[in-house]
Image: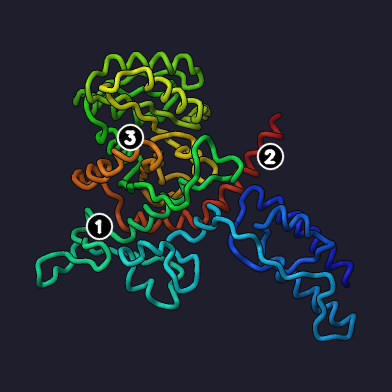
């Protein structure tokens, strides 16, 4: 029996290690393991599934106690703490809208803003609340006071707790690298909270982001792009002075030429928006985001200080986090149609914009994006926000299966 259990533990260790390389769960925990069986694997992959190890440990303890005639026997097994590491994207996603620790809010700093009545309780619901209120009471003083930051909730178009939880969750994941050793060209700072805005659809998010840029605006589109973007420009935004061209994003020489031409013709406080889809829709072209971001910085350095902004926008709808984190690769903004992968169940209509806290234009336009969202009334509904939070809790599992299936199809076709 001991031989069978230890063989099972070795298999579980190898399986857990392989899975954790793809979707690591870095949470402080204590795992009992057989040093001889898989101590090296456990130390190399400390995200190994604790529940499976604990279950196997219990079986091993039981068999050893029987064999040794003792109530407890540990032998060469050791109870060791996993290294304290940052929480992984898969952990944040699986707890979207939920607490990461018992009796605490998922977002301790913002708990009083979004969920005071719930987060103060010891036992927290395992489904986030759906806040439907559009109006809020006003105290006798006439001010919407709040004990935390002096700003109370006023109106559903500007404040909604469910929508705020979604925005905070997505903002955190956008700054978490899929692999700690593959974090892109920019640093990852888990303490930063970028400005994330949830809109009523993916196209609403795109419209909000473009309208947030100072005019005149010229957009450089990829040769292959989601049809809704040029349609928006042709039928609506072109009539308000926005210009656009297209270029192959895989040819950096052509991208640089288009950037310099647009920047030289866009005088004063205007904006040049380099719109990147990676993968593109429908041809699935993949752009080299770090190289394009570096190219933009090179072009900026050659322009006079009075020139307008050049921003890099990545529509990462078909490559969602944690597989892709464009903000860690130098992009200024990342856009998602959450109707697709993030929602995942074909029942929510929602778009998301996240502004980089690392770039100058990302920080400058972050609040402007929020303002445009609020005054134009294109914010996501509370119910759609709740549905996308539900979808996020299974995103990492769905992506893992979808990647495995895609690889099998690719291997078969090859």
Work out whether 276 lies above or below 398.
Answer: above
Viewer-side label of 3, 1: 3
Along the viewing direction, whichever of 189 and 329 lies nearer the viewer: 189
Q: CA distance from mark 3 to mark 2?
A: 41 Å
Are the residues tagged 3 and 1 within 8 Å (C-beta)? no
184 sits to left or right of 267: right
Local crowd size for mark 1, using a 10 Å CA cut-off: few (<14), some (14–19), many (≥20):
some
- Residue marked by disc 1: 159
Q: Name the quadrant containing residue 67.
A: bottom right
Q: CA distance from mark 1 to mark 2?
A: 45 Å
- Residue marked by disc 3: 361
Work out whether 58 lies above or below 276.
Answer: below
Q: Secondary structure at mark 1?
A: loop
| Residue in the picture at 63% in, 39% down | 406
Q: CA distance from mark 3 to mark 1?
A: 25 Å
169 sits to left or right of 273: right
Estimate the x, y position of residue 45 in percent, counting from the top left. 69, 54
């Amino acid at each position: 029996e001991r031989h069978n259990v230890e063989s099972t533990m070795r298999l579980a260790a190898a399986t857990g290690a392989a899975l954790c390389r793809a979707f690591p769960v870095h949470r402080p925990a204590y795992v009992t393991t057989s040093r001889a069986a898989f101590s090296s694997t456990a130390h190399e992959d400390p995200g190994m599934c604790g529940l499976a190890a604990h279950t196997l440990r219990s079986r091993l303890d039981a068999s050893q106690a029987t064999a040794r005639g003792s109530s407890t026997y540990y032998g060469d097994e050791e109870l060791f703490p996993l290294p304290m590491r940052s929480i992984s994207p898969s952990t944040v996603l699986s707890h979207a809208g939920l607490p990461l620790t018992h009796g605490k809010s998922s977002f301790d700093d913002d708990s009083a803003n979004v969920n005071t009545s719930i987060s103060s309780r010891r036992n927290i619901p395992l489904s986030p609340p759906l806040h439907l209120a559009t109006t809020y009471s006003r105290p006798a003083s006439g001010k919407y006071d709040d004990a935390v930051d002096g700003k109370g909730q006023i109106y559903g178009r500007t404040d909604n707790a469910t929508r705020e939880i979604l925005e905070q969750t997505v903002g955190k994941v956008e700054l978490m690298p899929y692999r700690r050793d593959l974090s892109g060209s920019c640093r990852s700072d888990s303490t930063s909270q970028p400005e994330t805005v949830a809109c009523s659809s993916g196209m609403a998010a795109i419209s909000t982001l473009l309208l947030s840029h100072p005019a005149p605006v010229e957009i450089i589109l990829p040769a292959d792009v989601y049809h809704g973007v040029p349609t928006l420009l042709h039928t609506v935004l072109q009539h308000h002075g926005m210009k656009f061209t297209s270029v192959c994003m895989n040819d950096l020489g052509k991208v640089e030429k288009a950037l310099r031409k647009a920047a030289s013709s866009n005088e004063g406080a205007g904006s040049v928006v380099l719109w990147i889809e990676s993968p593109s829709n429908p041809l699935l072209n993949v752009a080299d985001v770090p190289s394009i971001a570096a190219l933009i910085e090179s072009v900026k350095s050659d322009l006079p200080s009075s020139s307008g902004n050049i921003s890099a926008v990545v529509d990462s709808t078909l490559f969602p986090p944690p597989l892709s984190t464009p903000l860690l690769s130098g992009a200024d903004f990342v856009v998602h149609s959450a109707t697709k992968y993030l929602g995942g169940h074909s029942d929510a209509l929602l778009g998301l914009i996240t502004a980089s806290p690392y770039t100058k234009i990302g920080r400058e336009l972050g609040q402007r994006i929020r303002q445009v969202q609020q005054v134009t009334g294109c914010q996501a509904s509370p119910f759609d926000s709740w549905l996308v939070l539900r979808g996020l809790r299974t995103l990492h599992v769905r992506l893992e299966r979808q990647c495995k299936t895609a690889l099998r199809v690719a291997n078969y076709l090859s």
